[in-house]
Amino acid sequence: MPRSTIEEVAARAGVSRSTVSRVVNGSTAVSPAALAAVQRAIADLNYAPSRAARSLASRRTHAIGLVIPEDTTRFFGDPFLASVVAGIGERLAESDYVLTLLIASADPGGKMTRFVRNGGVDAAIIVSHHAGDAFVDRIADAVPVVYGGRPLQRHDGDYVVDVDNVAAARRATQHLIERGRTRIATITGPLMMGSGMDRREGFRAALADAGLEPFAEEEGDYSEAGGAASARRILAGGRPDAIFVASDLMARGALTVLQAAGIRVPDDVAIVGFDDSPVAQSTDPQLTTIRQPMRAQGVVMADVLLARLGGETPERTTMLATELVVRASA
């Protein structure tokens, strides 16, 4: 059956095309009599406006940008990001919105910023952001935004979905202390990111509670190669008896270096990772790690943003629970 047109609705209702358009797009500049006539005509003709027409009329794209300030190697190689994107996509599949990926470690020509500010998307989710990502701030000034993970520089109006990285890292380090380990090192995440800073803070707090000092602290980049490089730097200064590593990917890199040096895990050095990504069960021994609900984070980020777009006022900060998962590495 052919789709009814807006002109047919206007003719049936005895009003102009522009009046029908105003009713469809929720305008209040319509008399009660005209509104009732148009609504009857829409029902009689089973009229459904096309998404394209509604988008043009309302200047909405029905697209949500996922802004990830990383290079494509990191994006496609990181199971955390993959799980978050899957969660976002799962939730948006139930909505009228599509997901537009905007991946770039920088925006030197301003192309990404212009795309957003010129109406390319209605809103954005920003994940894996760093201090100094100035183009992210420009995007947040242009459209409604939800952050995955706290920005290092918070503003009163920010909406954030995160886990308590401080408490989770503290629990991971306490687990190592409870196993009798005293020479405990850490491989942090990037310290230009909230998660990197917070996990280091939790590590230090657990040691302070036990009257211990960090054996070593090395900054990583959440990659397997970065974890390996950090582990080599730690070993160059001596041998710890445990390492808390701020991601499973980095923990796998560290484990490879330890084993290549003839160091037994967990007998000589215990390791705890972070994420409970599929990587944690791919290693030998399997990783003790902090489980964060990666896919659920994506779902909740999308929920919060959809609520904002729907005119609701959700909580500014949503914190999801983490859990220590004990396996053979510690």
Image (cartoon, helix red, strand yellow):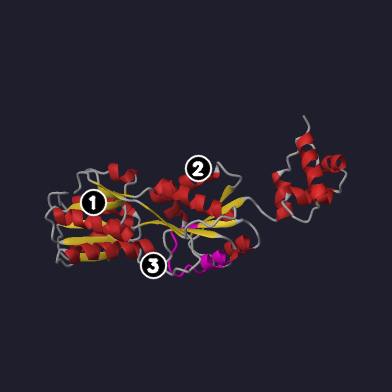
Tell me the residue that label 1 is attached to: 255
Under circle 2, the secondary element is helix
How packed mark 1 is, by other alpha carbons closer than 10 Å (few <14, some 14-19, many 20 or more), is many
Residue lying at 24% horizontally and 52% vertically, measured from the top left: 272
Residue 191 located left or right of residue 317: left
- Quadrant housing residue 246: bottom left
Tell me the residue that label 3 is attached to: 192
Q: Measuring from the top left, give residue 276's x and y in whole percent.
A: 32, 47
First in sequence: mark 3 vs mark 1: 3
Q: Are marks 3 and 1 in contact (CB under 8 Å)?
A: no
Q: Nearer the viewer, mark 2 or mark 1?
A: 2
Amino acid at circle 3: Met
Residue 105 located left or right of residue 96: left
Work out how far the residue at label 2 is from the one at label 1, CA to CA, in angstroms. Answer: 34 Å
**What residue range appears in magenta?**
126-141
Amino acid at circle 2: Glu
First in sequence: mark 2 vs mark 1: 2
Above or below 292: residue 109: below
Amino acid at circle 1: Leu
Work out how far the residue at label 2 is from the one at label 3, CA to CA, in angstroms. Answer: 30 Å
Residue 15 located left or right of residue 169: right
The extreme top residue here reads: 1
Q: Is 138 within the magenta? A: yes
Q: Is 38 within the magenta? A: no
Residue lying at 35% horizontally and 66% vertically, measured from the top left: 191
First in sequence: mark 2 vs mark 3: 2
